[in-house]
Image (cartoon, rainbow, N blue to C red):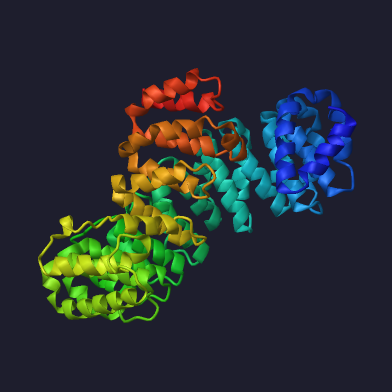
Amino acid sequence: MDRNTIERLCQQLGGDPDVRAAAVVEVKERALKAKPVLPVLLEYLRKPEESYRHGALFIIGWMGDSAAPAIPAIASLLKDSQEAATVRERAAWALWRIGPKSIPALIEVLESNDAAGRKLAAVQLGDLEQRAVAACPALCQCLHHPDLTVVSEAKSALVKIGAGAVQWLERELGAGNRVARVHAAAALLSLDRSHRRAVHAAVASLTEAEVAVRECAVFALLDGAGTHPELATADYLNLLHDESHHVRFFAVLALRNSGPSKDEAILPALVQALDDNDIHIPTIAVQALGDLETAALPALPKLLDSLKNPRFDEADQAEVITAIGKIGPAAQRALPLLISMQQQHRQSFSAQGQEADGDDAENVYGEALSTAILTIQGKVTPEHAIPYSRAEIDDLVRLLGSQDVRTCIAAHAELVRRGKDAIPAMRTIIANEQDPRLLSALAVLREIGSAAAELLPILMRLCLNRDLAASNRNFSRAVLLVFRAIGPQSIPVLRSMLKSAQCPNSELVNETLRQLE
């Protein structure tokens, strides 16, 4: 690679997408042989044109640990608060690509006063995982930073480092800084759901005055399986009155995830949640009432009022209708309204020349009406009312790509509840490597577990995709977590992958195999 080639590639890497894509491929092919021209690349890091600095960093990054002599120059760009954000991001990425030799430089950035630099350094240290254990003291110090985005990235990095970070996080449980304490507890609970000291610290944080502390605590105590076993239902009921809509949302979601309960206090609390100003909270409350089935009968008047609430669109109304239907024949008083709504719906569709009860993703509302009416009339029982229709699942899959994090969380939880019924939709997503919901689908499959075994061939293809592994450093780990959740059925596939010359992450595959064996 000569000077002219470097200049051309730097220009192309800053060009339009098609030209940039070709340049990326060329860099990957040439980078391993680029060491002799490292001095030239270092010159380009000092050029005034942003595109040259960005392009040179990309080439250096693909050289890997052979580019270690460039670490001081790269770290200088990362620490420069006046440098362009895209150049600083690429500098942080280049240090990650160089590997463990860059850890001292990244720690130095962590200890600077620049919040943006600290965040970038924390992300890269997290991606170095257990190799970055030496950074734990500096990362824990970042938990005390006034910028919550710095705190969040530091916490995520400590979780990725894993067991080596535990002793440092445990020290933070005694910190005087409430934010540091609750984020340390959240990190420990991510690593071990049964960590008693972390549970106590998180529960204690639920009553703190700072909203951000309470939000972090309730999120830490909630997981896909439901409420934390050491947290009483009463604790979540109290949170339904919190001033933070995030806290109220997670509290309702926790009550819903905990399953039907004999606690008499839950029903009035869920009815009260139907009046919450944040529309996402009544939606989860409706779903929780539906889970109570016949026990939700006292809530029927409020559910019927909700059908007249202008804030509820057709999707929200479909949830209410489904909840009413699950009450069964005891909900007879709802029939006149539901039948009237069905007639209006059919007339509307007929005017458009469409079938009102067709099985398409746009007709969840009509299907909910038909199922609820038949269930209340006793013509079908709730378990035979096809509650997990293709249309309903398709609607949830769309929500999985929402920009609203709470909507994504709720859609994720619903798809997990549907288990094997959701697998065809997840198959469609993971078969398309460009689908932006790919990681979200993998997270759903991880919780579905062994029922996803039929997707092992597609998962194997994803794991062997070098481009995906290179573009997203968490991708391979996400796929292998699904293999682990599927269980022993994954072992032959993992062994086959290790024999493949294309396997880009043999260490991770070996680690997963050891855990299963």
Does residue 335 show up?
Answer: yes
Q: Quadrant of the C terminus?
A: top left
Query: As displayed, is residue 178 above or below residue 345?
Result: above
Q: Give the side of residue 386 with respect to residue 136, left or right.
A: left
The answer to which image quadrant residue 393 occupies is bottom left
The residue lying toward the viewer, choosing from 80 and 297, is 297
Does residue 136 show up?
Answer: no
Image point (35%, 68%), residue name? 283
Image point (19%, 64%), residue name? 326
Whole-percent x and y of residue 514?
42, 23
| Number of marks present in the image shown | 0
Whole-percent x and y of residue 489?
33, 28
The residue lying toward the viewer, choosing from 445 and 176, is 445
Whole-percent x and y of residue 377?
11, 69
Determine the residue located farthest toward the top in the rendered image: 499
Query: As displayed, is residue 254 above or below residue 12?
Result: below
Whole-percent x and y of residue 492?
38, 22
Determine the residue located farthest toward the front in the rendered image: 353
Image point (40%, 53%), residue name? 412
Q: Give the side of residue 485 with respect to residue 182, left or right.
A: left
Q: Quadrant of the N terminus?
A: top right
The answer to which image quadrant residue 123 occupies is top right
Image point (55%, 19%), residue name? 501
Query: As displayed, is residue 394 above or below residue 443?
Result: below
The residue lying toward the viewer, choosing from 443 and 2, is 2
Q: Give the side of residue 446 with respect to residue 474, left or right.
A: left
Query: As displayed, is residue 131 above or below residue 111?
Result: above
